[in-house]
Amino acid sequence: MTKPDAEVVVLYGPTASGKSDLAAALAERLNGVVINADSLQVYSELKILTARPDDAARARAPHRLFGILPAVEASSAAWWRDAALAEIAAAHAAGKRAVLAGGTGLYLKTLIDGLSPVPAADMKARAQATALYSAIGGEAFRTALADRDPAAAARLMAGDSQRLIRAWEVVEATGTPLSAWQALPKNPGHTLKFCLIGLMPPRDQLYARIDRRFETMLDRGAIDEAARFDALGLSPALPANKALGLRELRRHLKGEIDLTEAVRLAQQASRNYAKRQVTWFRHQLPDDKKTPVSHVRHVSFEELSERNPTEIMSFILHPG
């Protein structure tokens, strides 16, 4: 029986680092529930391209918050945090350990640290910002944003379209820069403790895994899934459009590029995204070796091996 105050296990890492399989294995051994912490795996229409856990993984332990939203709805860190807290409470009430798994660092940070009172999504402003970004490109968009939110423009790269658009959306909708909203005090809103476990494999191993995984996605029907998604005719401003590989497969379906080029570009985009994830995790998540946080323990594994589950279980079960 899991104690109500048991630490929440958080398994994080870049895309294709092996989180899903390991989360299922840990949950099985801990009498746990796997809770999704990936911003794109929440969408029901994108099972293959977002690499949602397969049937074998889901058979090992209960899985929550996977494929529960239609793509026409916009997930957000605030929405996910509320949903995750509800699932954590339900797991503890059932005597189970909560095992969060995902690569959306902002979601995890929001859960651990709490939220500033940032406004909810404004879809009209987001659509306008998305259209402008597409029309003028990332560099020009970032320059324009600097006039309205200098702090956000300074910390974001021109290729980080999602966050640049969000920053524009907020200042357009509220008249106040996103950076000003984010500077307001945060309130965790809970008394949870967290056991953070990072999977951070060497770059060459990670990139090889990314390339192989996309090829596997094609074998499982990723092109058909992209075609079905495209047929929905959804607004390009919706977050579901950010699924890795979706843009490239759409271009292939429209006859703009052949499949070989689509695969190459999708794999490259995935590798670039993984690199950004690694950088974010190393600078944004609490590190108890540098700046201890009372409610967080943290360990990172830079090698993937058959020893990982045993070592991780030891870290979880022996906090001293």
Image (cartoon, rainbow, N blue to C red):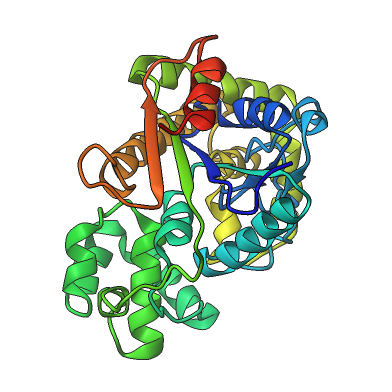
- Which quadrant, please, contains the C terminus? top left
Residue 214 in the image: state x and y as whole percent: 58, 26
Residue 297 percent location from the top left of the image: 39, 41
Residue 67: image location, x then y, percent: 74, 51
Identify which residue is drawn at 22% across, 47% down: 291
Residue 75 showing in the rendered view: no
Furthest toward the bottom, the residue is: 175
Is residue 80 placed above or below 2 in the rendered structure?
below
Q: Nearer the viewer, residue 150 or 320?
A: 320
Q: How many numbered marks, from 0 up? A: 0
Name the spot of residue 70 as percent of width and height, x first.
Answer: 74, 61
Q: Residue at x 53, y 51 (%)?
A: 242
Image-quadrant location for residue 163: bottom left
Q: Is residue 300 above or below residue 74?
A: above
Q: Quadrant of residue 218?
A: top right
Q: Nearer the viewer, residue 296 or 284?
A: 296
Horizontally, is 171 left or right of 255 in the view? left
Viewer-proximal residue, 44 or 118?
118
Residue 288 placement, left or right of 308: left
The N terminus, quarter of image: top right
Residue depicted at 31% across the width and 64% down the height: 136
Left or right relative to 237: residue 188: left
Near-viewer residue (209 or 253): 209
